[in-house]
Image: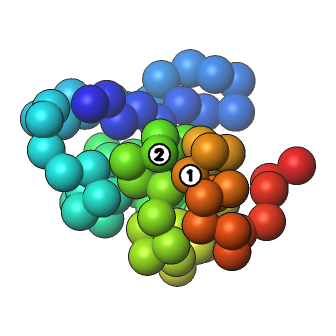
Amino acid sequence: MLGMVVNRDGFTCAHEVFEGGRQDAKSPNNMMDILEKGTGRLEGSTIIVDRGIALDENLAAIRGRECHYIADQGRIGLQGNEEPAF
Protein backbone atom coordinates (compact mmCIF):
# COMPACT_ATOMS: atom_id res chain seq x y z
CA MET A 1 0.00 0.00 0.00
CA LEU A 2 1.40 3.41 -0.93
CA GLY A 3 0.91 6.70 0.88
CA MET A 4 2.12 9.78 -0.94
CA VAL A 5 1.97 13.54 -0.38
CA VAL A 6 2.24 15.81 -3.41
CA ASN A 7 2.25 19.59 -3.55
CA ARG A 8 -0.10 21.75 -5.62
CA ASP A 9 2.25 21.42 -8.60
CA GLY A 10 2.10 17.61 -8.44
CA PHE A 11 5.61 17.09 -7.09
CA THR A 12 6.10 14.43 -4.42
CA CYS A 13 6.84 15.85 -0.95
CA ALA A 14 6.82 12.55 0.94
CA HIS A 15 5.96 8.91 0.38
CA GLU A 16 5.74 5.79 2.47
CA VAL A 17 5.25 2.17 1.48
CA PHE A 18 2.98 0.48 4.01
CA GLU A 19 2.71 -3.23 4.71
CA GLY A 20 0.32 -4.97 2.33
CA GLY A 21 -2.26 -7.57 3.27
CA ARG A 22 -3.40 -5.72 6.36
CA GLN A 23 -6.90 -4.67 7.23
CA ASP A 24 -7.07 -1.27 5.54
CA ALA A 25 -9.99 -0.14 7.64
CA LYS A 26 -7.76 0.26 10.70
CA SER A 27 -4.89 2.11 9.06
CA PRO A 28 -5.81 5.67 7.91
CA ASN A 29 -4.95 7.44 11.18
CA ASN A 30 -1.62 5.62 11.41
CA MET A 31 -0.89 6.37 7.77
CA MET A 32 -1.73 10.06 8.16
CA ASP A 33 0.43 10.28 11.32
CA ILE A 34 3.44 8.87 9.46
CA LEU A 35 2.95 11.13 6.43
CA GLU A 36 2.51 14.19 8.67
CA LYS A 37 5.90 13.47 10.27
CA GLY A 38 7.51 13.92 6.86
CA THR A 39 5.57 16.95 5.68
CA GLY A 40 3.91 18.65 8.61
CA ARG A 41 0.19 19.10 9.17
CA LEU A 42 -2.02 17.74 6.37
CA GLU A 43 -4.83 20.25 7.01
CA GLY A 44 -6.54 21.19 3.75
CA SER A 45 -5.04 18.23 1.90
CA THR A 46 -7.08 15.83 -0.19
CA ILE A 47 -6.78 12.17 0.80
CA ILE A 48 -7.61 9.55 -1.85
CA VAL A 49 -8.87 6.27 -0.42
CA ASP A 50 -9.90 2.95 -1.87
CA ARG A 51 -12.99 1.04 -0.86
CA GLY A 52 -11.13 -0.78 1.93
CA ILE A 53 -10.68 2.51 3.80
CA ALA A 54 -13.84 4.36 2.69
CA LEU A 55 -15.82 3.53 5.85
CA ASP A 56 -17.80 6.11 7.83
CA GLU A 57 -15.42 6.15 10.80
CA ASN A 58 -12.35 6.54 8.57
CA LEU A 59 -13.89 9.32 6.51
CA ALA A 60 -14.87 11.06 9.77
CA ALA A 61 -11.23 10.76 10.93
CA ILE A 62 -10.05 12.37 7.69
CA ARG A 63 -12.57 15.21 8.09
CA GLY A 64 -11.51 15.53 11.74
CA ARG A 65 -8.00 16.41 10.53
CA GLU A 66 -9.57 19.12 8.37
CA CYS A 67 -8.71 17.25 5.18
CA HIS A 68 -10.82 16.50 2.12
CA TYR A 69 -11.17 13.07 0.54
CA ILE A 70 -11.96 11.31 -2.68
CA ALA A 71 -13.39 7.87 -2.04
CA ASP A 72 -14.36 4.85 -4.09
CA GLN A 73 -17.91 5.65 -5.21
CA GLY A 74 -19.00 2.00 -4.95
CA ARG A 75 -18.41 1.90 -1.18
CA ILE A 76 -20.16 5.23 -0.60
CA GLY A 77 -23.09 4.03 -2.67
CA LEU A 78 -23.34 0.87 -0.54
CA GLN A 79 -23.38 2.83 2.71
CA GLY A 80 -25.81 5.38 1.35
CA ASN A 81 -25.01 8.05 3.93
CA GLU A 82 -22.26 10.07 2.20
CA GLU A 83 -22.79 12.66 -0.48
CA PRO A 84 -20.73 12.29 -3.67
CA ALA A 85 -17.76 14.69 -3.79
CA PHE A 86 -18.84 16.02 -7.20
Figure label count = 2
**Which residue is denoted by mark 1 in the rendering?**
75
77 or 12: nearer the eye? Answer: 77
Q: Earlier in the sequence, mark 2 or mark 1?
A: 2
Using the rendered image of the protein, determine whether residue 15 is visible from the camera's viewpoint: yes
Residue at far right of view: 86
Residue for point 67% across, 45% down: 73
| Displayed quadrant of residue 16 | top left
Using residue 77 as the reference point, say whether residue 43 is left or right of it.
left
Q: Position of residue 60 (x, y in %)?
A: 52, 76
Task: Verify CB contact (< 8 Å) between mark 2 and mark 1.
Answer: yes
Which residue does the image show at 15% across and 32% down from the upper left?
20
Mark linked to residue 38: none
Look at label 2 and name its amino acid.
Arg
Callout 1 amino acid: Arg
- Relative to 85, is 49 on the left or the right? left
Quadrant location, the N terminus: top left
Q: Quadrant of residue 63?
A: bottom right
Q: Secondary structure beneath disc 2?
A: loop
> Is 48 on the left-hand or right-hand side of 23?
right
Residue 65 percent coordinates (x, y)? 50, 73
Q: Residue at x 80, y 54 (%)?
A: 85
Q: 77 or 68, which is in the foreground? A: 77
Disc on res. 51: 2
Q: Is residue 33 left or right of residue 20?
A: right
The Cα atoms of the two marked residues, 2 and 1, are separated by 5 Å
33 above or below 15? below
